[in-house]
């Protein structure tokens, strides 16, 4: 059990009890697009009496909207689904720092801003999936993907995708720009096809035989374990997986984050909502409802996520990784990775 779990549970219980008759609203700008999140919202509303008003869209649209609204923005919280856009919103001054004992105890330091501007609440590991019948010795590190032994055998998303950008950003941070550029060039040479589609499409390409190894976030595969995903679920047993860099830097993770908006009109309600997202019940629902890894250590995994197993993550600060995003895109462009 996480050493602070008993204290944390008590703190969250007191917050929920204290706001049970709080009344009022919290205005949520969210780029999470999962129907399963409805339970998260309804449970919070039932427990606190606070109504959640939602505006949903992609992160870039929401960031632009908050910028245009300025000090008159009704946003209380901004939720995003990758570190690069979280960092961009922070650079634009769209968050305000909060000092929450609940969140500081619950969320590991590398998954939150050092001043409390934002906090990570769920994780998706960026790992390898491979065809068991065609791959005897799968790659064990991100560097391995650039080895000529994998020429014509790898599938990955476009360089313009945020997941691809933050992965290369982490390599820049951990290994330096020269090594990162060599990696991007080697990976481009090893692609089985031009980058196309989403993460689910990369895994489907392994099943179809178009490539032998694919890079994808864990929750796309875990979803295919839990429910029917065309082109994957009926071939689950033929697919293996590797959590890269377990002996070195740890596996790169993508996160969903939330922060209190700079001009939040309902600041206390916003903090209460973020603290609720760190509770055991909400953390379990991230796993059970959307096949993600919880951000809070010690929270149990859903069966679909547990099937993939535990792993050691890269604990480099997400801010430090995201800061390299623009350079990562430049490197992809320089080596011709589309």
Image: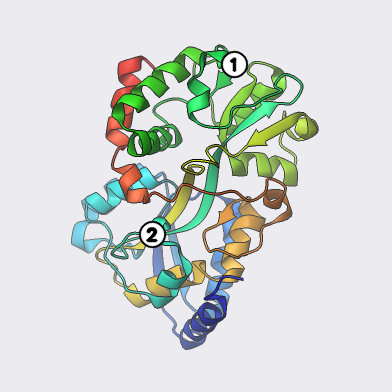
Decide: is 275 above or below 235: below
Crowd band around label 1 with a 10 angstrom C-alpha radius: few (<14), some (14–19), many (20+): many
Q: Can residue 38 be seen in this view?
A: yes
Element carrying mark 2: loop
Q: Residue 51 in the image: state x and y as whole percent.
A: 47, 72
- Mark 1 or mark 2, earlier in chain: 2
Q: Residue 37 in the image: state x and y as whole percent.
A: 57, 57
Q: Can residue 196 be seen in this view?
A: no
Element carrying mark 1: loop
Q: Residue 96 in the image: state x and y as whole percent.
A: 26, 65
Q: 185 or 230: nearer the eye? A: 185
Q: 249 or 217: nearer the eye? A: 249
Q: 80 or 303: nearer the eye? A: 303
Q: Which residue lies furthest to the front in this view?
A: 247
Residue at 49 percent across and 50 percent down: it is: 32
Crowd band around label 2 with a 10 angstrom C-alpha radius: few (<14), some (14–19), many (20+): many
Q: Residue 318 in the image: state x and y as whole percent.
A: 37, 49
For the C terminus, which image quadrant? top left
Q: Quadrant of residue 30?
A: bottom left
Whether residue 11 sits left or right of residue 169 in the image: it is: right
Q: What's the distance in space between the residues labelled 1 and 2, CA to CA?
A: 36 Å
Q: 45 or 300: nearer the eye? A: 300
Residue at 47 percent across and 50 percent down: it is: 255
Pointer 1: what residue? Answer: 153
Scheme of image coloration: rainbow
Say which mark, if any, is on residue 330: none
Q: In which quarter of the image is residue 294?
A: bottom right
Whether residue 183 sits left or right of residue 38 in the image: it is: left
Say which mark, if any, is on residue 112: 2
For the N terminus, which image quadrant? bottom right
Residue at 23 percent across and 55 percent down: it is: 69
Decide: is 30 above or below 236: below
């Amino acid at each position: 059990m996480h050493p602070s779990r008993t204290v944390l549970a008590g703190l969250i219980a007191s917050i929920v009890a204290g706001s049970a008759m709080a009344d009022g609203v919290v205005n949520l700008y969210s780029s999470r697009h999962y129907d399963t999140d409805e339970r998260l919202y309804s449970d919070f509303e039932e427990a606190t009496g606070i109504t959640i008003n939602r505006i949903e869209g992609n992160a870039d649209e929401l960031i632009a909207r908050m910028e245009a609204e300025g000090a008159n923005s009704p946003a209380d919280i901004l939720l995003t689904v990758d570190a690069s856009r979280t960092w961009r919103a922070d650079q634009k001054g769209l968050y305000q720092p909060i000092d929450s004992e609940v969140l500081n105890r619950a969320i590991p330091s590398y998954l939150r801003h050092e001043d409390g501007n934002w906090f990570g609440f769920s994780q998706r590991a960026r790992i390898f999936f491979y065809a068991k019948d065609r791959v005897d010795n799968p790659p064990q590190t991100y560097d391995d993907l650039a080895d000529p032994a994998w020429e014509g055998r790898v599938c990955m998303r476009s360089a313009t995708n945020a997941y691809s950008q933050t992965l290369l950003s982490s390599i820049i941070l951990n290994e330096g720009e020269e090594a990162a550029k060599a990696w991007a060039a080697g990976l481009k040479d090893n692609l089985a096809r031009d980058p196309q589609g989403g993460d689910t499409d990369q895994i489907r390409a392994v099943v179809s035989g178009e490539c032998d190894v694919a890079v994808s976030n864990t929750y796309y595969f875990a979803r295919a374990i839990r429910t029917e995903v065309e082109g994957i679920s009926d071939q689950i047993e033929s697919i293996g997986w590797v959590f890269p860099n377990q002996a070195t830097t740890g596996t790169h993770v993508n996160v969903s984050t939330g922060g209190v908006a700079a001009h939040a009109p309902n600041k206390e309600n916003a903090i209460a909502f973020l603290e609720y997202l760190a509770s055991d019940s909400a953390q379990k629902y991230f796993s059970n409802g959307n096949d993600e890894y919880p951000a809070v250590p010690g929270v149990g995994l859903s069966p679909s996520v547990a099937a993939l197993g535990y792993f050691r993550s890269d604990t480099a600060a997400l801010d430090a990784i995201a800061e390299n995003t623009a350079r990562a895109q430049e490197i992809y462009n320089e080596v011709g990775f589309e």
